Amino acid sequence: MVAWGIITTLLGIVQNYQGLLAARIFLGIAEAGYPRYDVQVRQAIFFSAASIAGAFSGLLAYGISFMDGIAGLAGWRWIFILEGILTVVVALGSYFFIYDFPETARFLSNEERAFVVFRLRYDYQDADMDDSQRVAQSDEYHWKYVKMAFQDWQIWLNLLVYWGYNCPLYGISLFLPTIIKELGYKTTAAQLLTVPIYVAAAICTILVAWVADRKRVRSPFIIAGLFLQLVGYTMCISSGNAGVTYAGIFIATCAIYPTLPSNITWLSNNLAGSHKRAAGLGIQIGLGNLAGVVKAAASNFYRANDAPRYILGHGLEIGFTSLGILAAFVLVFNYRRINAKRAQQLANNEHNRFTPEELSTLGDRAITFRYTL
């Protein structure tokens, strides 16, 4: 985080394209434990910060535009300098307040630490499961868990779901002011009109997460979000009216942001063993963020000569979203099938053929594990 802040600050003082490109490459390098039915609200709070940042970026860009010429620097340079310095300050301060594991959290008593550790280790079975069938998830570190993650079918399917909203997310993040500007608004007005969209998206993100945690399901909210994206982009592609397009972007953004933490939480819930989960989420987020590379390489998605309807850009977003919906339905179908099979195996006491240690090593492939829908 400190490295990210320093590199961002340095982006404000680059003097040529080569320097900007090198700094951006290093910035990309710098970017590269709760119970599963409590985690989405925490994820939502974290990711809604991105939405709020989107809102403030419009206001910030508007305010910093008045700094043009101060200290002989252009206004855009001040954006990188100020945001980079703030990131470094926050990162240095967070070192003293963020703990890696419950075992090292000094603000918890010994009894509280023991309770949290126990709750996390036995979190991946149904609440009504017999105590004799409960198995602690493995915290053992071994490279075989990384190999298991790369071989897990659900991670690769979930990656398609990730692309289903992350490609549209990059489209919104990179081109929203341009799209609004092409609707007939001036640059300043376009920046300000992005604010209500991002604020509403942040509120939706936290509300959806709160409900999902209490209902203990993920897929209905993910699939509903993807379908709402379709509605939003269909409105955008079907009309050149400024009001309709703005409403479509509003709906799509408010659908995209809640889907992001929902899907990351969904995969996290369905990977057992802390090291396999870490590897699996690394694959999901790392390869999923190649959507940004797609957007950078295909910057002509939203071409100036396509304004104001941007049929190519919106059409491609509809394509990515449709792929995500299909992948989500395939995941749900397979999770239901496997859960039903394992319930029958437990009813036949087949779990007695395994030792607790073997079941723990199997993680989410153990017959005692239940996939979250």
Image (tube, rainbow, N blue to C red):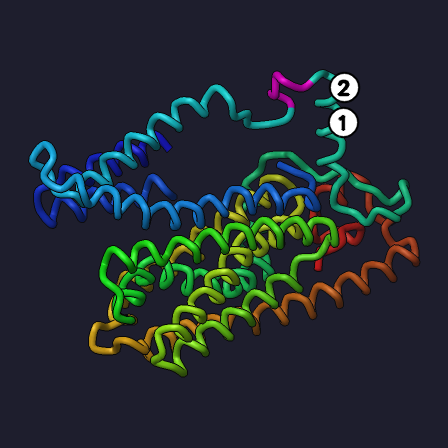
247 within the magenta span: no
Q: Are marks 1 and 2 in contact (CB under 8 Å)?
A: yes
Q: Which residues are magenta?
A: 103-108
Tag 2, which secondary structure? Answer: helix
84 relative position to 136: left or right: left
Q: Which of the numbered marks, if any, corresponds to residue 111?
A: 2
Residue at the spot 32% in from the left edge and 42% down from the top edge: 29
106 within the magenta span: yes
Give the x, y percent position of residue 276. 59, 45
Three-letter amino acid code at disc 1?
A: Phe
Give the x, y percent position of residue 129. 87, 48
Per the model, the C-alpha gap separating discs 1 and 2 is 6 Å
Tag 1, which secondary structure? Answer: helix
Q: Which residue is mark 1?
A: 115
* Quadrant of the rendered image containing residue 10: top left
Three-letter amino acid code at disc 2?
A: Glu
Q: Which of the numbered marks, if any, corresponds to residue 80?
A: none
Residue placed most toward the observer, 209 or 129 = 209
Residue at the spot 44% in from the left edge and 69% down from the top edge: 247
114 relative position to 146: left or right: right
